[in-house]
């Protein structure tokens, strides 16, 4: 290498180093923090909702002031949605510090905190806290057309996916099967996440699958557009008894038009909650809560996903049985939603 080329290369490396130092100095001066939101499968609802919440609460350095039309998130915060196996995975992840916050079903959150249900044989997970109740999740029982499945009882002997071991869907699927007098031994149980369930349905390897998510769900939309699936109702006296027995199921309806050529379908629903570790600082959680409910972020919730339309401050505490994080509680007290 000639002396001139070596000198040019050295100068270029020096320039890049200086630029990097300057850039890092700016970031360091302004302050930047990263936050992960545990969600679910990319084919479900948690991931797009988690991505939506990340956009609402983020405000990276240089975003501009909220009052001036810039980001109305937490100053210096960059939040990202992380795909997971679902509610059980998310609760464990927050508890162990794998990620800072997560979405989870209200029934699974309560079971984990109280050591009941699927957590009855293990130590309660009591280091989780709630930021807010978000929206209802509908139980989808998706069946292959031509499989002869018109009711939950018809699942007997069929190939049915109940999702993975660490998902809330699996818990709900087993509860519903049991309510209709079926046990896992009565079906050909398959443990597949929504993505795999879609592939198996397309390949003719599956007759039905359970999915708990806010409609419309990508996994169901893809199959409905191909006219190969239908939805089975979960209603009647059996559903009513399950509602009374558990306290966390509610009546719901997946409307006509949510999926191509599928009529309105009565079903059950649980709620989605945004959870966080008790070790998160009061200041951070207060700012997260404030950003989520900032009126200037309303347009992001309304336009980001259909379920975003259902995320409202009026239902922020609905169905919350696990303690709120003190930072979130402080915000709700300040706006008069929570008494002292």
Image: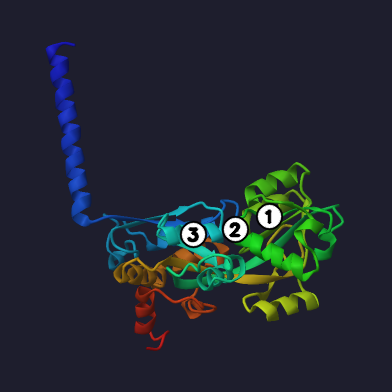
Q: Residue at x 62, y 76 (%)?
A: 248
Looking at the image, do the residues carrying marks 2 and 1 touch, with CB atoms under 8 Å apart?
no
Q: Quadrant of residue 249?
A: bottom right
Q: Quadrant of residue 307?
A: bottom right
Could you classify mark 1 by the number of other residues whose Cα lies within 10 Å: few (under 14), some (14-19), or many (20 or more)? many
Could you classify mark 3 by the number of other residues whose Cα lies within 10 Å: few (under 14), some (14-19), or many (20 or more)? some
Whether residue 230 sits left or right of residue 97 in the image: it is right
Residue 85 horizontal/vertical position (percent): 56, 53
Residue 336 horizontal/vertical position (percent): 39, 86
Residue that carries the numbered disc 2 in the rendered image: 167
Q: Distance of mark 2 from mark 1, alpha carbons?
A: 18 Å
- Where disc 1 sits, the SS reads helix
Which of the two discs, 3 and 1, sits closer to the camera?
Answer: 3
Q: Of the numbered discs in the image, which one, if any, rests on residue 220? A: 1
Q: Of the numbered discs in the image, which one, if any, rests on residue 92? A: 3
Residue 295, above or below 50 = below
Q: Of the numbered discs in the image, which one, if any, rests on residue 168? A: none
Q: Please state, as top left, top right, bottom left or bottom right, where the N terminus lies in the image.
A: top left
- Where disc 3 sits, the SS reads helix
Q: Please state, as top left, top right, bottom left or bottom right, where the C terminus lies in the image.
A: bottom left
Query: First in sequence: mark 3 or mark 1?
Result: 3
Query: First in sequence: mark 2 or mark 3?
Result: 3
Residue 286 horizontal/vertical position (percent): 34, 72
Residue 321 horizontal/vertical position (percent): 51, 78
Whether residue 72 sits left or right of residue 54 in the image: it is left
Which of the two discs, 2 and 3, sits closer to the camera?
Answer: 3
């Amino acid at each position: 290498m000639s002396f001139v080329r070596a000198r040019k290369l050295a100068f270029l490396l020096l320039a890049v180093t200086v630029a990097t130092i300057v850039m890092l100095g700016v970031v360091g001066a302004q302050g930047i923090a990263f936050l992960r939101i545990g969600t679910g499968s990319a084919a479900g609802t948690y991931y797009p909702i988690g991505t939506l919440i990340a956009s609402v609460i983020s405000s990276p350095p240089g975003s501009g002031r909220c009052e001036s039309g810039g980001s109305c998130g937490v100053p210096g915060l960059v939040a990202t949605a992380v795909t997971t196996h679902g509610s059980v995975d998310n609760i464990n992840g927050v508890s162990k510090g794998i990620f800072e916050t997560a979405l989870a079903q209200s029934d699974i959150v309560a079971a984990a905190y109280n050591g009941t249900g699927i957590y009855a044989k293990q130590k309660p997970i009591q280091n989780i806290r709630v930021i807010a109740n978000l929206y209802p999740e509908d139980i989808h029982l998706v069946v292959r057309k031509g499989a002869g499945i018109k009711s939950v009882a018809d699942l007997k002997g069929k190939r049915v996916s109940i999702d993975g071991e660490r998902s809330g869907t699996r818990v709900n699927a087993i509860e519903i099967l049991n309510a209709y007098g079926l046990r896992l031994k009565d079906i050909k149980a398959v443990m597949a996440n929504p993505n795999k369930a879609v592939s198996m349905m397309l390949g003719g390897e599956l007759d039905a699958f359970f999915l708990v998510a806010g409609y419309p769900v990508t996994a169901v939309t893809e199959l409905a557009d191909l006219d190969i699936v239908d939805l089975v109702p979960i209603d009647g006296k059996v559903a009513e008894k399950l509602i009374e027995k558990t306290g966390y199921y509610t009546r719901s309806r997946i409307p006509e038009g949510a999926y191509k050529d599928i009529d309105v379908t009565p079903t059950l629903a649980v709620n989605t909650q945004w959870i966080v570790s008790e070790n998160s600082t009061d200041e951070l959680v207060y700012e997260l809560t404030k950003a989520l409910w900032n009126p200037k972020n309303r347009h992001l919730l309304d336009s980001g996903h259909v379920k975003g339309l259902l995320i409202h401050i009026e239902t922020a505490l609905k169905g919350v049985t696990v303690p709120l994080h003190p930072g979130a509680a402080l915000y709700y007290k300040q706006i008069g939603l929570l008494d002292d």
